[in-house]
Image: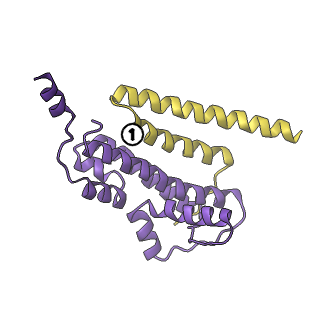
Amino acid sequence: MATNVKTQAAAPPARNWYGIVFLAWLVPGAGHFLLKRPGRGALLLASVAIMFLLGLMMRGAMFQPQTGDVLTTIIYCGGFLGDLASGLFYLLTVWLGYSQPDMPGHVHDYGTKFLVAAGLLNILAMVDAYEIATGEKE
Amino acid sequence: MPKMNLSHFEAAILFALFSSVVLGVITKRTDSERLRYGVRCFAYFVAALIGLGWLMKLGHG
């Protein structure tokens, strides 16, 4: 009897986590909104959006995937994935023609890092949405 | 879109603030724990920022 109860408690709720994770990527915080966590979703959306906007206002550069030596591949492909992880913000920015060359100066440099970091924070939000959707977390 | 000029300190503080918010939101299980963790992360970021800043200043002589 006790074993049955334990098995039932451990079973994850049946939820379509693919769609939730995809939406969480496309619009930061959307996964949390779908999972009825609007407060947390709003904080995630605001943080990622403001960070991305600050990156654009500091004229940060978007990474394009490049291969060559190991370090170049890691930096440029990793940076591209980080930029891409911002979802709709990245897609809209590219579609609207934002193209900033990599320039010297600490403001541009911080801008580039803010753009990548916004995407990396969105990846953390996607993982959190996945864990909530699969019942690993409340 | 207007261009923004921030100092190292301002940019790093903003980075710390938004990173701490996200780390707080996704990490803990209750709201009070999240708030405490977010504030603690921000404090650690600022402490590291000031500490490393002084280290670089002293290192340069």
Disc 1 packing (10 Å; few <14; some 14–19; many ≥20):
some
Q: From the top left corner, tell me how far across and down residue B5 is, in percent.
A: 64, 56
* The C terminus of chain A - image quarter: top left
How far across and how far down the image is residue A93, in percent? 46, 70
Q: Which residue extends farthest left?
A: A1
Q: Judge left or right: residue A123 versus residue A27.
A: right
Judged from the image, the secondary structure of the residue bearing numbered disc 1 is helix
Mark 1 sits on what residue?
B26
Position of A126 compared to B44: left or right? left
User: Looking at the picture, how far across and down is residue B25, in whole percent?
Assistant: 39, 38
Residue furthest to the top: A2
Q: Is residue B19 above or below residue A17?
A: above
Letter of the chain that mark 1 sits on in the rendering = B
Residue that appears at 46% across and 29% down = B37
Is residue A66 positioned above or below A7 on the image? below
Going 49% across and 39% down the picture, which residue do you hit? B20
Count of numbered circles on the image: 1
The quadrant of the image that shows the N terminus of chain A is: top left
The chain displayed yellow equals B
Q: Is residue A99 visible?
A: yes
Residue B24 in the image: state x and y as whole percent: 43, 36
Q: Which of the 4 image quadrants contains residue A57?
A: bottom right
Residue B2 visible, this orientation: no
| Residue at the image point whose x is 51% and y is 28% from the top | B40
Quadrant location of residue B50? top right
Amino acid beneath label 1: Ile
Q: Determine the residue located farthest toward the right in the rendered image.
A: B61
Which is nearer the eye, B1 or A110?
A: A110
What colour is chain A?
Answer: purple
The correct choice, above or below, for A9 with respect to A61 in the image is above
- Closer to the camera in the image, A134 or A24: A134
